[in-house]
Amino acid sequence: MFPKLAAATAVAVAATTALAAAKCKTPDQCTGTTVPSQIRLAYAGDKGVAVSWNTGSKLTNPTVYFGKDKKLNRIAQSQVSTTYATSSTYNNHVVIDGLEADTTYYYKPNCGSETYTFTTSRRAGDDTPFSFAMIGDMGTFGPDGLGTTVGKGGANPLKPGDLTTIQSLSSFKDKYDFIWHGKSPRFGDIAYADSWLKEEKAGYITPLNTTDRGAVYDRILNEFYDEVEELSKTKPYMVGPGNHEANCDNGSDLSLCLPGQLNFTGYRHHWNMPSTPSGGVENFWYSFDHGMVHFVMLNTETDFPNAPDEPNGEGAENAGPFAPSGAQLAWLKKDLASVDRKKTPWVVAAGHRPWYVSTSACTECRAAFEPILLEHGVDLVLHGHKHFYERHAAVANGVAQEITANPTAPWYVVNGAAGHYDGLDVPTTPYVSTSREVIVAYGWNLFTVHNCTHLSTSFISSSNNTVLDTATLIKDRKCHGGKGEDGKGNH
Ligand SMILES: *[C@@H]1O[C@H](CO)[C@@H](O)[C@H](O)[C@H]1NC(C)=O
Ligand SMILES: *[C@@H]1O[C@H](CO)[C@@H](O)[C@H](O)[C@H]1NC(C)=O
Ligand SMILES: *[C@@H]1O[C@H](CO)[C@@H](O)[C@H](O)[C@H]1NC(C)=O
Ligand SMILES: *[C@@H]1O[C@H](CO)[C@@H](O)[C@H](O)[C@H]1NC(C)=O
Ligand SMILES: *[C@@H]1O[C@H](CO)[C@@H](O)[C@H](O)[C@H]1NC(C)=O
C-alpha cells in the first residue's frame, strides 16, 4: 500500500523549547544512513513549502529545522519515510505550513551539514512581474545517460564544453522563482532510468546482467536526483507525470520488468506536489497560484478516456488509474471554474504529451482536455514528450490565432528538449499549420509574466546559454492586481 503523504504542522516555537515541551517527536539520531541527500522543494499551498529528501535508512520522525535567519528556531516534522521494491533509499517528506508569502526562509533537514534557503510563493493577486523556468524530458547526464559519447539507440551527444541543461539552469538561478518540469518540470519523463536496459544492450554502460538489473535502474535514478539537487534544494521543483515514470520495457524485454519501474512507483514516492491543498491526486494532477498566475498540472498518461499509459492505451506502460473514472476531468473543470481572474489573470496548464506538434500527436489527450481548456480561457499550454522545441500559435480546434492579436484560445509551447540518453527527435516536415518556430537543440524556456497583458518566453540553448527564440503573448484586458494593503497582495 502506498502511504498517503501527510502534511506535517510546523511548530512555531524554538526547537529546543518545543522538544523539551514534548510537542515534537525526537528527531532521528544522526548516523551515516540518516544524512539527507537529493533535497527537493515544492510549493505546498499559498503558505507552505514541501521539503523532501532521501536517506539510506527509514526515518522515524523526518524533521526540518527552519526560520527567517540561520538560527533555524522552528521545526516541522512528519512520519512519512517510504521506500519500494528495488529502491536503495527512503523518501522523506515534510510540509512546512503557516509561512508568509514571498518570503525567504533558511532551512536544514535533520542531520544535514548545510543550511539552504527557499522562498515561498507569491500570493495570488500580487502583480509583481516574475519568471519561471520550464523544462521537459530531462534525463541523467554523464556516463550513465547523456554524455559526450553515445551508444546504440542514443543520439546527439554533448560536445566537449557544452553545458548540460542543469548547468544552464543553474547559471540563471537568480532569474526565476521556480522550475516547472512538466515532466513537466520534464513535463514528465524524469531521469530516464528506464533506459538502463537499452543502454546495457547497447554496451554503453555495464554489460547486461539480469541479476542486478534493479540496481542499475536505481543507480541511474539516484544520479538524476543527485544532479538535480543543485536546483531543487533552493528552487521549488514542480513536476508532472510522463510515460517514462511507468515504462518498463525500454529495451524490449518484458521479462526484465522491475516492480519499482512499473506504474509510476518511483515517481509517486519521490515527490510531494500540492494536490492536497488543490483537491488533486498525488503527484498526478494539482494546481497552485503564484502571483498573477494560476498553474495547473494535467496527467496526460492515465485517468481519462483512452489514456495512453493505461492497460489498453497506445503504450506498453500498463499503469493507473489512480482515481475513480472521470475524476481528473471533473477536477479540472471545477478547478478552472473556481479561478478568480481578477487575482490571477493568467491560467497556465502543463501536461506531458502534446496534441499540437509536428510529429505524432496525442489525439486522445486533445479530445479529453482541449474542450475544457478552451471553455475556461486557459492562456498558455506547455507540453514535453517530443524531443525538440516547437512554439505554436494560439490554437482553438486546430485553427491558429496569432499570439499578439489578443487570442481567445490557449497558446501552445512544446519543449521536450532538456536532454537524455536518446538525444533529440526529428520533427516531421512540413510542420503543422499551427507551428511558428522549431528548434532542434537542447534547451529550456524562461517564461516571464510582466503584467496582466504581457507574458513572454525565451528558449535558451543549454549548451551555451544563448537565447535562440523569443515570443510574447499579448492580451487586451484590464488589470485588477496590486500589491495589496500589506504590500504582499493581502486585500
Ligand atoms: C551481476 O549482479 C550481481 C548482483 O549485483 C553480482 O553479484 C554479479 O557479480 C554480477 N555479475 C557480473 C558478471 O557482473
Ligand atoms: C523507449 O524510449 C524511447 C525514447 O524516449 C521512446 O521513444 C519509446 O517510445 C520507448 N519505448 C517503449 C516501448 O516504451
Ligand atoms: C497502479 O497503481 C494504482 C494505485 O495503487 C492501482 O490502483 C492500479 O491498479 C495499478 N495499475 C496497474 C496497471 O497495475
Ligand atoms: C506590460 O508589460 C509589457 C512588457 O514589459 C509592457 O510593454 C507594457 O507597457 C506593460 N503594460 C502596462 C499596462 O504596464
Ligand atoms: C549556441 O548553441 C546553439 C545550439 O547548439 C547554436 O545553434 C548556436 O550557434 C550557439 N551559439 C553560439 C554563440 O555559440
Image (spheres, grey):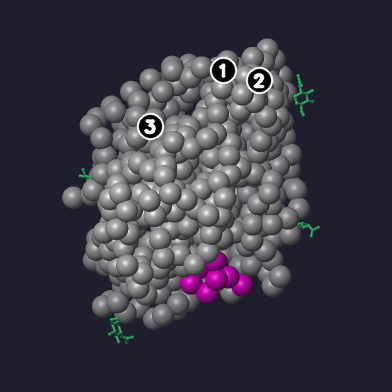
Q: Earlier in the sequence, mark 2 or mark 1?
A: 2
- Image quarter where the C terminus lies is top right
Residue picked out by circle 1: 491
Kind of residue indicated by mark 3: Pro
Q: Which mark is residue 326?
A: none
Please state the horizontal and vertical placement of residue 183, each as a whole percent of the image. 47, 47
| Secondary structure of the residue carrying numbered label 1 | loop
- Residue indicated by mark 3: 277
Q: Is residue 318 left or right of residue 460?
A: left
Q: Indicate which disc residue 482 carries.
A: 2
Looking at the rendered image, the disc whose residue lies closer to the viewer, 2 or 1, is 1
Residue stretch in magenta: 141-148
Is 410 a magenta residue? no
* Image: 111 above or below 329: below
Q: Are marks 2 and 1 in contact (CB under 8 Å)?
A: yes
Q: Report whether the residue tagged 1 is closer than 8 Å to ligand 4.
A: no
Residue nearer the viewer, 364 or 380: 380
Secondary structure under the numbered disc 3 in the rendered image:
helix
- Left or right: where 144 falls relative to 258: right
Q: Position of residue 468 (x, y in %)?
A: 74, 47
Q: Is residue 167 above or below residue 301?
A: below
Q: Amino acid at mark 1?
A: His
Which residue corresponds to the image point at 48% horizontal and 16% vertical from the top-left?
A: 375
